[in-house]
Image: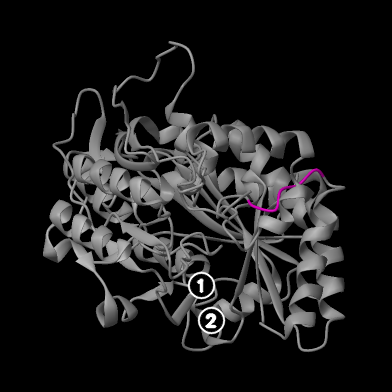
Amino acid sequence: MTAADSLLARLTEIVGPSGLVTGEELRGRSANWTRPTEPCAARALVRPRDTAETSAVMAACHAAGVAIVPRGGATGLVDGTLCSPDEITLSTERMTAIEPVDPLGMTVVVGTGATIESVQNAATERGLFFPLDLGARGSATIGGAISTNAGGLRVLRYGMMREMVLGLEAVLADGTVVSSMRPLIKNNTGLDLKQIFIGTEGTLGIVTRAVLRLRPEPAGYATALIACPGVDDGARVLRAAQSAFQGRVSSFEGLWPDFYRLMTAPGRATPPLGYDYPFYAIIEVECVPEESDRFLGLLEGLMGEGTILDAAVASSEEQRRGMWRIRDRVEHLNADGIERAFDVSVPLSKMDGYVRGALDGLAAIPGCRAVVYGHIGDNNLHWNTTRLDAAGNAAIDAAIYAPLAELNGSVSAEHGIGLEKRGKLPLSRSPEEIGAMRLVKRALDPDNRLNPGKIF
């Protein structure tokens, strides 16, 4: 028996025959969401059921000198789950348990294979609210959200995934279990170990369980699609709304004209406003119904000043959902061949100039079509462009990424680094910062067995 066969036999002992996927069955799984026709290239896919099995799998692979690549819902956009033929991919798809919600402490313990939507539903059943929300909520997992420190649509009010994790359990490269499952908001007892595993894309440990912080369910929403003379005016609207509603603005999504037109083309979402404006935004405030007049009054006052040019206010839940369809249905971009996805952060005060300059640069690239939108209230822009040849893609990358260093921006706001952005990391991090990150990697994974080649 070869060493490879011996390892597979040991993994089968740990997880059972149904817990190991190899051969043609494995090749029937795609590499990830952005590579739907490319088969998973790993030697095998292992599906542990819990922390104990994960620990045993990690120990077996560590002893065999084989690297492990963690895999959640495979909805990531930076090739963070790509494998080579000599690696094992570890899927959390069987770690989906959601324990009973604690309604007083407003917490829930979940397996990291649970989807975001399933946790949202579990919270809603107890009159509570899990704030994280992504377009891929039905397939993206809690583990994936932890690994990239996902943000989504409500960062303004509730913060990134980091703010929603009170405790977690992780398995290191050698199988050591680090368990910090305390459901405490305040726990100032030295190094906050859970933070080491949040946003590090499975390069330091594989998270198997988490204690999540829930919130009271919002009493209602006031939602509007607005048109403004520009991004800076949109920022003024956001500031005024934050002041008027004491920080209860949950979303402020910027939509540039080409994105708005594409998403409201015939057969898609209904356009509440015309197409003649330079900038659009969806603003949503969490409030009780009695505050709707104050929301209308705020918008009317800003229209009188010229800060808002036009506005459509949702008067029903269906109208609210219709507005969000304009922002959420990004599959329309892929249908139109605008399939390369970018995720960057730019200071709000510099965003208008950055977008103008990048759009000019992209327009000069033959065959390139680009749209821009995003969570501008928390500095996050999403670009989508056509896919060209190698030279064309490099020119697109330069137009989007190169200006970020001077602007004190970031090459990744919420999607992570993976393989896709590894070469771009120096635009956002100094050599000293990257060196410090590598020191932590060497301390926890000296043999580079956990998701090797990603980030660093």
Observer-nearest residue: 315 or 21? 21
In the image, what residue occupies the spot 28% across and 26% down? 181
Residue 256 position within the rendered picture, expressed as x and y whole percent measured from the top left: 69, 67
Residue 87 at x, y = what percent?
41, 62
Circles 1, 2 touching at the beta carbon (< 8 Å): yes
Q: Is residue 87 left or right of residue 396?
A: left
Question: Circle 2 sits on which residue?
Answer: 334
Q: Mark 1 or 2, which is nearer the eye? A: 2
Q: Describe the element under mark 1 as helix, strand or loop.
A: loop
Q: Which portion, as a residue range, is magenta?
A: 408-412
Q: Quadrant of residue 56?
A: top left
Most common secondary structure along the magenta stretch? loop
Give the amino acid at mark 1.
Answer: Val
What type is the residue that disc 2 sits on?
A: Asn
**Considering only vertical position in the picture, is 93 above or below 39?**
above
Which one is in front, 242 or 45?
A: 45
> Where in the figure is residue 270, as x and y percent of width and height?
49, 77
Residue at the spot 78% in from the left edge and 74% down from the top edge: 394
**Whole-percent x, y for residue 183 in the image:** 29, 23
Question: Residue at horizontal 45%, vertical 69%?
Answer: 325
Q: Is residue 411 magenta?
A: yes
**For mark 1, what is the residue?**
330
Q: Nearer the viewer, residue 284 or 174?
A: 174
**Residue at the (24%, 23%) spot, across then down:** 105
Q: Alpha-carbon distance for marks 1 and 2? A: 7 Å
Residue 304's disc number:
none
Which of the two residues, 88 or 145, is positioned nearer the viewer here?
88
Is-magenta flag for residue 167? no
Q: Secondary structure at mark 2?
A: helix
Task: Give the class, few, some or many, for how many residues have Cα within 10 Å of label 2's Cα (few <14, many ≥20).
Answer: some
Is 239 left, or right, of 196 in this rendering?
right
